[in-house]
Amino acid sequence: MFNLWRDKCFINGLLYEKLYLTHLGLYKDNVEMNLQKPGVFLINIRFLKKDTNILIYNYIFYPKEFIDSLIMFFIVRDNFIKSLTFRESGDFLCIIDDSLNIHDHVKEIFKYINSFNVYLYEELKYIKSNKEYENFFYLDLVKKSTIALNNDELIEVFNNIVKKNYQKLELKSFTDIYPYCKIDDDIDLINGTLFLIKDINAFLFDIRKSGYIISQGPQAWRGQINTMNHFLNNLDIDYRDSLYNHLDYHTYHGTVQFQERLPRKAFSFKNIHNLIGNIRF
């Protein structure tokens, strides 16, 4: 199968310029990070207590320049089995808000979104070649997938996940397998779901409108290490590392015409989040 992460570069000239200038110490975004800043919120949600309607969430933010490459990172999942996220947190379902400011050439890929998922492709190939449908749990496939939804679909899928209505998650890529797989209702799929959202306030409002209480948890807990922080931090490390390798590959092979190859430290947390994202702390 084609590996789009290597076939095409998803770092545009504007993002390269900002990475280049921050590396030289010549750039810091002049708009401090805030919940209205254009970009993408990566959100993870958990139940505060089981069998309640009380949810907690955490998030990490990336400015708009990173949207295309982030989406492709989650679609392709190149070398995911060797990633820190896989080792520490395992598989996850990624749900993309299709109202994000995505360039058309990336949005076009949504029509065939899991066809370019390298990690999922290998799993499906094994299952189909060995006819292992009846011995396979459907959610194991779902948790290797990426889907793009409009707002109404997104909230509907969110409700199905939270309520464990997993039989309603008939994703297009698996229609030939779904009737034969087992569905494990004991799994809390919400724990292993990542949402890429344009407007975090609107998303949280829709969740509350659906009858849930959602916050970032009790104040006393917010400075502590927790599984949501850990998951998001692992994703951030893997993404920044993959972004470096992605640009280096295309610069080396001449598929992009940028000034020069950038060192790994140009993709540091400080450069991407403190300087380009201008986070407060």
Image (tube, rainbow, N blue to C red):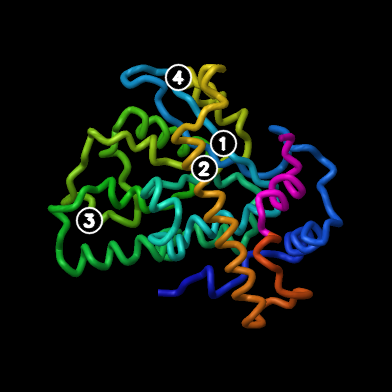
Chain-order first, disc 4 or disc 1: 1
Classified by dominant secondary structure, the portion drawn in magenta counts as helix
In the image, what residue type sits under mark 2?
Leu
Q: Residues within 10 Å of mark 2 (few under 14, many from 20)?
A: many
Q: CA distance from mark 3 to mark 4?
A: 33 Å
Identify the mark at residue 59; answer none if there is no mark. Answer: 1
As for residue 273 lying within the magenta part, the answer is yes
Position of the N terminus, as image quadrant, is bottom left
* Front disc: 3 or 2: 2
| Contact check, label 2 and label 1, Cβ < 8 Å | yes
Q: Determine whether the residue tagged by mark 2 lies in a helix, strand or loop.
A: helix
The answer to which quarter of the image holds residue 130 is bottom left
Q: Which residue is mark 4?
A: 212
Left or right, residue 15 beside residue 109 = right
Chain-order first, disc 3 or disc 4: 3
Q: Determine whether the residue tagged by mark 4 lies in a helix, strand or loop.
A: loop
Q: At 34% from the left edge and 49% from the top edge, which residue is drawn?
A: 171
As for residue 98 lying within the magenta part, the answer is no
* Front disc: 3 or 4: 4
* Front disc: 2 or 1: 2
In the image shown, does 211 or 92 lie closer to the viewer? 92
In percent of width and height, residue 260 lies at: 75, 75
Q: At 66% from the left edge and 55% from the top edge, which residue is drawn?
A: 268
In the image, what residue type sits under mark 1?
Tyr
Q: Which residue is mark 2?
A: 232
Chain-order first, disc 3 or disc 1: 1
For residue 10, above or below residue 261: above
Identify the mark at residue 177; answer none if there is no mark. Answer: 3
Q: What range of the chain is rendered magenta? A: 267-281
